[in-house]
Image: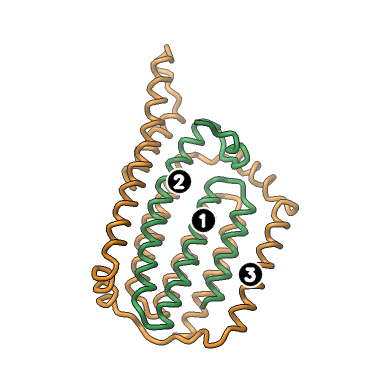
Amino acid sequence: MTLLFYLAGAVAIVATLLAITRRHAVHALLYLIVSLLAVAATFYALGAPFVAALEIMVYAGAIMVLFVFVVMMLNISDHAMEVERGWLKPRNWFGPAILAAVLLAEVIVCIATSPASSSITGAVAPKQVGASLFEGYWIGVELASLLLMAGLVGAFHLGRHAIAGEEKQHVLNTDAARVNSRSDLVHAGARGTSHAA
Amino acid sequence: MLTLAAILFTLGLAGLLTRRNLIFTLMSIEIMLNAAGLAFIAAGSRWGHADGQIMFLFILAMAAAEVSVGLAFVLLYHKRQQGLDVDAASELRG
């Protein structure tokens, strides 16, 4: 189990590092999915199989599929790749990377010097999680449902705004047949997002 | 395992500070939320409590809501600005 944990942790770190340095959004998304799967394996090694399954289903499944849909709808072209190459110059990422590395070193020193760390005690069964979730944390469940509802309404509002603006533009456009194919894509994307939320 | 969570969080933070593409910004936020969830799971496993996993469930719900709103905003923003530069987003109004 310990070997599994360290292996999955190394895979997660490498995949995340590759994900934040890729220029193409789709490549970065694929690496991010690998990273999430590795984190799910880490959860399994830590004795949380229920959460590992949820991680694969919700994160690597639903959220990443949303990302992939949006990337496909935005139609990232070669020009965007060139722009991204310009943004990824070393002098742009050197300062933030150094600052983040300093913070990471501090945290690691704090963790390493604190007593009684890093021992995997025991698995927590899904039954125990469910019982505790609906006994002690029922208000949290209700708040989570409210939050998801708010997210749904917010996404729908943003999407509807885009659709309304598009219809106005469409009316203003005298040549009705010459509808821009790209704005049509955005229209469909807004609908897809609010639906998937 | 807390070290792993810290490393993942720092990678997400570096990505958030470095990239100027809105999609990469959202992805970095996802990485950071995931790292926070990993820290919760590690703590829950350390003391054998279910509370860590419950907190992860709440983080999961929050991330799902956040990413849906964020991606809807990205679509709207791309339609208006013809690009995904975060720096141009400092001129948002209304």
Number of residues whose C-alpha sits closer than 10 Å to that of mark 2, classed few (under 14), some (14–19) or many (20 or more): many
Instruction: Count residues near mark 1 (Cα–Cα under 10 Å), then give few for <14, some for 14-19, many for 20+.
Output: many
Q: To which residue does mark 1 refer?
A: B29
* Tag 1 secondary structure: helix
* Residue projecting furthest to the top: A174
Q: Chain of mark 2?
A: B
Residue at the limit of the structure toward the right, as seen here = A91
Same subunit under labels 3 and 1?
A: no
In the rendered structure, are the residues bearing label 2 and label 1 in contact, judged by CB atoms less than 8 Å apart? yes
Q: Residue at x 63, y 69 (%)?
A: A104
Q: Is residue B43 above or below residue B32?
A: below
Task: Give residue A44's position: percent from left, percent from top.
Answer: 39, 77
For badge 2, the amino acid type reads: Gly
The residue that appears at 66% across and 72% down in the rendered structure is A105
> Is disc 2 placed on a helix, strand or loop?
helix
Q: Which mark is residue A168?
A: none
Question: Where A162 falls versus A22 (above or below)?
Answer: above
Say which of A32 and B17 sits in front: B17
Q: Position of residue A9 (x, y in %)?
A: 52, 74
In the rendered structure, which amino acid carries the disc numbered 1? Answer: Ile
What colour denotes chain A?
A: orange
Quadrant of residue A176 in the image?
A: top left
Q: In this view of the protein, which residue sits in the foreground, A55 or A176? A: A55
Q: Measure how far apart labels 2 and 1 are at the Cα level.
A: 11 Å
Q: How is the image coloured?
A: by chain
Q: Are marks 3 and 2 in contact (CB under 8 Å)?
A: no
Residue corresponding to mark 3? A104
